């Protein structure tokens, strides 16, 4: 697969201490892994041209947990405002800081549709959440996915159960099929995007979520080989639902809007 490299705005990584003492927008991000939620937040900031500084999530830093209010990422903190960790909260903060270009449709019905689609990708039990549980299930069963130790940690953190693991492939497939159908209908109407004829946040969420199934090439997304193998875990139900239209949309997004290479 070849993707034209539209250069991404460079990201300045700072220490935990610098982030705590700083002002402006700082955001805790997952380091060295193309986490869909962190990469979507980075993509929104890139599209809007919002200046910010990044601090990689450090699980062993009590200062970072106290400042961010949790041991998770992404967490966006603007000046002395409360930390924002939900995908929708981060999006709305970015809309306030840089109203243009807006990533929210002006029409109320389209706006509601955008948040609904975004929740199906980013929210609890959505595409990325369910794929993560799918990788936990595979790892605990010794079939691939996350390594056993990582699978146990992630599973405990995100509510894995045997039932949740068993349900995950069907849930992943259902969302993938819905998204593919939406894109095909939009393309038939002459649009490259999920809603209307212009870019919205859901296009970014869709592009970044596919890292959990088909990460970008190593040349533009440098990953540890073990992590790449985990993300690339294949099984028939997901493979059948991962329509090529989704990957073409992902490639278009990075070429036209998000830029490469990723800075992890």
Image (cartoon, rainbow, N blue to C red):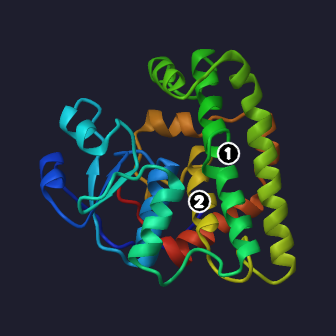
Q: Quadrant of residue 125?
A: top right
The image's mark for residue 58 is: none
Depth check, front residue: 167 or 214: 167
Instruction: Measure how far apart labels 1 and 2 are at the Cα level.
Output: 10 Å
Which residue shows up at 61% across the image and 73% down it?
A: 200
> From the viewer's perspective, is residue 171 above or below residue 98?
above
* Res. 259 visible in picture: no
Tell me if mark 1 has few (under 14), some (14-19) or many (20+) residues whose alpha carbon lies within 10 angstroms of its own. many
Helix, strand or loop at label 1? It is: helix
Q: Quadrant of residue 103?
A: bottom right
> From the viewer's perspective, is residue 70 above or below residue 32?
above
Number of numbered discs overlaid on the protein picture: 2
Q: Quadrant of residue 185?
A: bottom right
> From the viewer's perspective, is residue 40 above or below residue 229?
below
Helix, strand or loop at label 2? It is: helix
Which residue shows up at 30% across the image and 58% down it?
A: 81
User: What residue is pinned by disc 1?
Assistant: 127
User: What residue is pinned by disc 2?
Assistant: 205
Which residue shows up at 66% across the image and 37% down it?
A: 130
* Residue 219: x %, y % from top left: 43, 58
* Res. 56 visible in picture: yes
Which residue shows up at 72% across the image and 83% down it?
A: 197
Is residue 96 left or right of 253 when viewed as pictured? Answer: left
Depth check, front residue: 199 or 145: 199
* Residue 211: x %, y % from top left: 56, 50
Quarter of the image with the N terminus is bottom right
Is residue 182 left or right of 230 when viewed as pictured? Answer: right
């Amino acid at each position: 697969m070849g993707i034209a490299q539209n250069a991404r705005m460079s990201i300045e990584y700072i220490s935990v201490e610098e982030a705590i003492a700083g002002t402006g927008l700082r955001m805790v991000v997952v380091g060295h892994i193309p986490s869909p939620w962190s990469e979507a937040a980075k993509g929104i900031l890139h599209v809007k041209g919002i200046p910010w500084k990044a601090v990689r999530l450090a699980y062993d830093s009590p200062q970072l947990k106290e400042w961010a209010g949790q041991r998770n990422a992404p967490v966006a903190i603007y000046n002395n405002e409360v930390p924002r960790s939900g995908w929708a909260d981060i999006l709305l903060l970015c809309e306030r800081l840089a109203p243009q270009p807006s990533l929210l449709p002006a029409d109320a019905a389209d706006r509601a549709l955008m948040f609904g689609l975004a929740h199906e990708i980013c929210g609890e039990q959505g595409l990325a959440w369910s794929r993560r549980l799918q990788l936990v299930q595979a790892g605990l069963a010794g079939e691939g996915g996350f390594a056993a130790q990582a699978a146990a940690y992630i599973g405990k953190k995100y509510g894995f159960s045997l039932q949740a693991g068993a349900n995950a492939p069907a849930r992943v497939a259902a969302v993938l099929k819905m998204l593919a159908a939406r894109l095909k209908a939009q393309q038939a109407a002459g649009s490259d995007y999920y809603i209307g004829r212009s870019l919205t946040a859901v296009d970014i969420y869709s592009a970044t979520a596919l890292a959990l199934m088909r990460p970008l090439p190593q040349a533009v997304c440098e990953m540890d080989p073990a992590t790449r193998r985990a993300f690339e875990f294949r099984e028939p139900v997901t493979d059948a639902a991962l329509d090529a239209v989704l990957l073409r949309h992902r490639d278009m997004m990075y070429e036209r809007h998000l830029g490469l290479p990723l800075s992890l």
